[in-house]
Amino acid sequence: MGSMGSTSSARAQEMRRVLAQWQRSGLRLRAFGEQRGIPLSTLRWWRRVFRAAGAAAPAVAFTEVPAPVSVPRPPAVLEIVLASGHLIRVPAGADRATLEQVLEILQPRC
């Protein structure tokens, strides 16, 4: 906790989001507060708290996460949509004879 107040409490996190919205809004602090029903004194106080703590803007850090070397890939699937609306998913490696039988069975119903 700093000399002015905590910057890690739930209220501080909420006010950090509010001040970030204000910064993106392009409005003057007074107008922004009036639109949201937040007293100007409250916004100014929290702005001072964050500045004193060196946290005027929310800190964002990006880290590149490398893809795992051995990611299992799902087998390729062929999808066939018949005129009747039936959807047939054919897994990779399916034999032709089985596929022909399925299509013959569905043919009269299509």
Image (tube, helix red, strand yellow):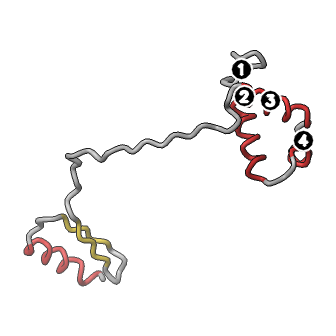
Question: Residue 47: x and y, percent?
Answer: 79, 33
Characterize the local packing of mark 1: few (<14), some (14-19) or many (20 or more) Cα atoms within 10 angstroms. Answer: some
Considering depth in this image, is 74 or 13 the residue closer to the camera? 13
Dot in front, 1 or 3: 3
Q: How many marks?
A: 4
Considering depth in this image, is 109 or 40 the residue closer to the camera? 40
Question: Residue 37: x and y, percent?
Answer: 90, 41
**Image-quadrant location for residue 38:** top right
Residue type pointed to by label 3: Arg
Q: Is residue 106 above or below residue 59?
A: below
Question: Is the residue under label 1 in contact with that under label 2 (CB below 8 Å)?
Answer: yes
In the picture, the disc for residue 77 is: none
Question: Residue 87: x and y, percent?
Answer: 31, 72
In the picture, the disc for residue 37 is: 4
Residue type pointed to by label 2: Ala
**Image-quadrant location for residue 93:** bottom left
Please name the residue that numbered disc 1 is placed on.
6
